[in-house]
Amino acid sequence: MAARSGRLEEFPEIDRVGWFAPEAAAPLLVVGQQAFLERLAAHLDGRG
């Protein structure tokens, strides 16, 4: 994709989507996303 500057830039895209239980999703996430998953699970369990 060409930016306004005329340089060619690349932007990552989503190539696969899936629904996972939190326990199955945790190992697939990068470290920065794991805290969000833990907070989300706590919220959905009524602890957050």
Image (cartoon, grey):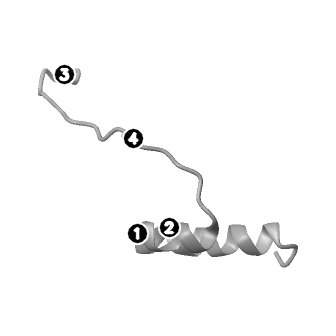
- Mark 4 residue type: Ile
- Mark 3 residue type: Ala
Q: Which mark is residue 14?
A: 4
- Image coords of residue 23 (percent x, y): 59, 74
Say what secondary structure mark 1 lies in: loop
User: Where 5 sits versus 17, above or below?
Assistant: above
Q: Which residue is mark 2?
A: 33
User: Which label lies toward us, 2 or 4?
Assistant: 4
Whether label 2 touches label 1, CB < 8 Å: yes
- For image coordinates 53% across by 49% down, the residue present is 18
- Image coords of residue 12 (percent x, y): 30, 41
Q: Quadrant of the C terminus?
A: bottom right
- Image coords of residue 1 (percent x, y): 21, 24
Is 14 or 11 nearer to us in this picture? 14
Task: Say whether residue 35 is left or right of residue 27.
Answer: right
User: Where 26 sits versus 3, above or below?
Assistant: below
- Mark 2 residue type: Gln
User: Which label lies toward us, 3 or 4?
Assistant: 4
Marks 1/4: CA distance?
Answer: 15 Å
- For image coordinates 52% across by 72% down, the residue present is 26
Which residue in the rendered view is the most extreme toward the right? 46
Marks 2/4: CA distance?
Answer: 16 Å
Is 20 or 44 nearer to us in this picture? 20
Q: Which mark is residue 2?
A: 3
Q: Which mark is residue 1?
A: none
- Mark 1 residue type: Val
- For image coordinates 48% across by 45% down, the residue present is 17
Task: Say whether residue 8 is left or right of residue 43.
Answer: left
Marks 2/3: CA distance?
Answer: 30 Å
Which residue in the rendered view is the most extreme toward the bottom? 47
Whether label 1 touches label 3, CB < 8 Å: no
